[in-house]
Image (cartoon, rainbow, N blue to C red):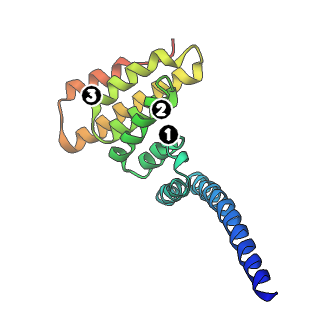
Amino acid sequence: MKQPLGIIAIALSLLTGAALSSYAQTYSAEACLDSARVAAAADRHADAIRWYHRAIARDSALASQLNLELGHQYTWADKPDSAIGFYRAHLAAHPDDIDGEIGLGRAQAWAGHLKDAIATYRAALPHAGDREDRCASVWRARRAGAMIMKRRSAITKPCSRTIRRISTRGWGRPR
């Protein structure tokens, strides 16, 4: 009589363990995602990146949903070259997302790809719509790119005529 009960107990523990493991896997991905967002809000970008990748490792379906957030975190962690790939992946799925376009332009500017950044900002302007805050965001992002060019010019001395042209044109200012 003991053996059938032992087999039943083992079967029940295996079934219960599988169900709990499945639940823990989902919970763990959500917990990692929550930790990533808390770290991001506290400007702990390297920690946020690690937590985002842990969440994706536990639930691969999150990968496509987190491209924009990872792009932001890599940008603010001063890894703009890495951020560019995440922004492009996000924009492949959401081509008219103004936040993705501004983020891509910012990452390109911070990585020193200034011509690409200007082209990205120009492409973003028609998608900004009539909302003033969106247009102002594009304008501020472009001005930030121009300011980066000015800062880098003090170090590398590129053609100052190009810098003046970009910083005085005011591309993307709200009309």
Q: CA distance from mark 2 to mark 1?
A: 6 Å
What's the amino acid at mark 2?
Gly
Disc with the residue nearer the chain's start (1 vs 3): 1
Q: Nearer the viewer, mark 1 or mark 3?
A: 1
141, 87: nearer the viewer: 87
Q: Residue at x 45, y 43 (%)?
A: 71
Q: Residues within 10 Å of mark 3 (few under 14, many from 20)?
A: few
Quarter of the picture holding the N terminus = bottom right
Q: CA distance from mark 1 to mark 3?
A: 22 Å
Q: Nearer the viewer, mark 2 or mark 3?
A: 2
What's the amino acid at mark 1?
Leu
Q: Position of residue 64 (x, y in %)?
A: 50, 41
Name the residue that disc number 1 marks.
68
Q: Which mark is residue 100?
A: 2
105, 57: nearer the viewer: 57
Name the residue that disc number 3 marks.
115
| Left or right of residue 48, residue 84 in this image | left
What's the amino acid at mark 3?
Lys
* Depicted 53 relative to depicted 138: above or below: below
Q: Secondary structure at mark 3?
A: helix
Q: Secondary structure at mark 1?
A: helix
Q: Residue at x 51, y 26 (%)?
A: 97
Q: Position of residue 152 (x, y in %)?
A: 26, 41
Mark 2 in CB contact with mark 1 (< 8 angstroms)? yes
Q: Residues within 10 Å of mark 1 (few under 14, many from 20)?
A: many
Mark 1 in CB contact with mark 3 (< 8 angstroms)? no
Disc with the residue nearer the chain's start (2 vs 3): 2
Disc with the residue nearer the chain's start (2 vs 1): 1
